[in-house]
Image (spheres, rainbow, N blue to C red):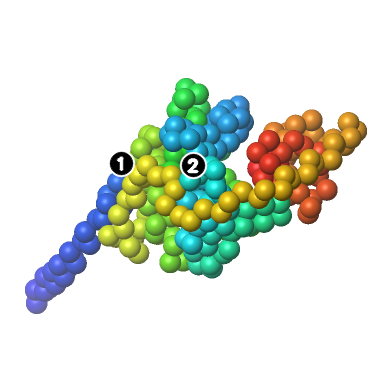
Amino acid sequence: MATPAPASAPPSASPKPRGPALAALAGIPVKGRAPRTGYDRDRFGQAWADADRNGCDTRNDVLRRDLTDVTLRGGTRGCVVLSGSLHDPYTGRTLRFVRGAGTSGAVQVDHVVALSDAWQKGAQRWPASTLTAFANDPLNLLAVDGPTNAAKGDGDAATWLPPRAAGRCAYVARQVAVKIRYRLWMTAAERAATERVLARCPGQPLPTARRIPLGGSPEQSAPTTPRPPAPARPEAARDPRFATCRAAKAAGHGPYTRGRDPEYGWYRDGDSDGIVCE
């Protein structure tokens, strides 16, 4: 008796269409992580520079873009954000932002692709102008919950994703857009983690960045009573362990907030926002 021929395999299901973010992911090179040697935050230029020359620093630009119910400080040409509400993309919670010592740190501006991660995946070869542009590019910046941003550190998609699952597709799509724009690479683990997330949302688009306009919100007049000068810092009041903020941050310390952290008095608060070693 002849042996019956094996039944033919059923036709495979039609592949799902690849959305813009998932399709773009395929164009990002995969390489190993380069050494962190030579990385320094200062290489990326002044923190929150006015990179787009609109007369306002990048942090305030991003706060105006991402917050709602914003109140601006009068006399700043529509730049400085005094207060507002944030629907945090990382946790899903609604946060209240109030500018000042002990409160500004509740909302931080995150580099979605961390500066250290970029340094180890292609940025080491960039000129200073590109490093500064990257650190201040609105495409790579989001206003987020401060403690959650601190927990993220410099992790990539293989080591950290937002705790709010519903926000992960947009988060990794933004990382893809940034790495495409700046020709950065991914590790194999990062690529696999990104693809797993985008497989759940194959139509996820790539985000784009637009110039952030000044103003657009009510202004609050500056107080007429001048702020008393801060007490002079004694010469001996300096960090006994680290000579600079840079050294403290490299060891995993900071930021320090006025009125909460005794270490605040050890460093100069250049922008007078009540936070040092950001």
Distance between the Cα atoms at labels 1 and 2?
A: 41 Å
**Residue drawn 60% across and 33% down?**
41
Badge 2 marks a residue whose secondary structure is loop
Image spot of residue 29 (x, y percent):
37, 38
Q: Name the residue under label 2.
A: 77
Q: Mark 1 points at which residue?
A: 27
**Relative side of 72 to 52, left or right:** right
Question: Please, which residue is most extreme toward the front here?
Answer: 224
- Disc 1 marks which amino acid? Gly
Question: Please, which residue is most extreme toward the left here?
Answer: 2
**Residue drawn 36% across and 45% down?**
209
20 vs 131, nearest the viewer: 131
Residue 183 visible somewhere in the drawing: yes
The N terminus - image quarter: bottom left
**Relative side of 179 to 160, left or right:** left
**Residue drawn 49% across and 42% down?**
77
Residue 135 visible somewhere in the drawing: no
Q: Which numbered mark, 1 or 2, is in the foreground of this view?
A: 2
Residue 171 - label: none
Q: In this view, does 269 lie above or below 125?
A: below
Image spot of residue 149 (x, y percent):
58, 53
Image spot of residue 273 (x, y percent):
67, 45
Image spot of residue 18 (x, y percent):
24, 55
The C terminus - image quarter: top right
**Residue drawn 79% across and 52% down?**
259
177 vs 8, nearest the viewer: 177
Q: Are marks 1 and 2 in contact (CB under 8 Å)?
A: no
- Disc 2 marks which amino acid? Arg
Q: Is residue 168 above or below residue 9?
A: above
Graded by Cα atoms within 10 Å as few (under 14), some (14 to 19) or many (20 or more), the crowding at tag 2 reads few
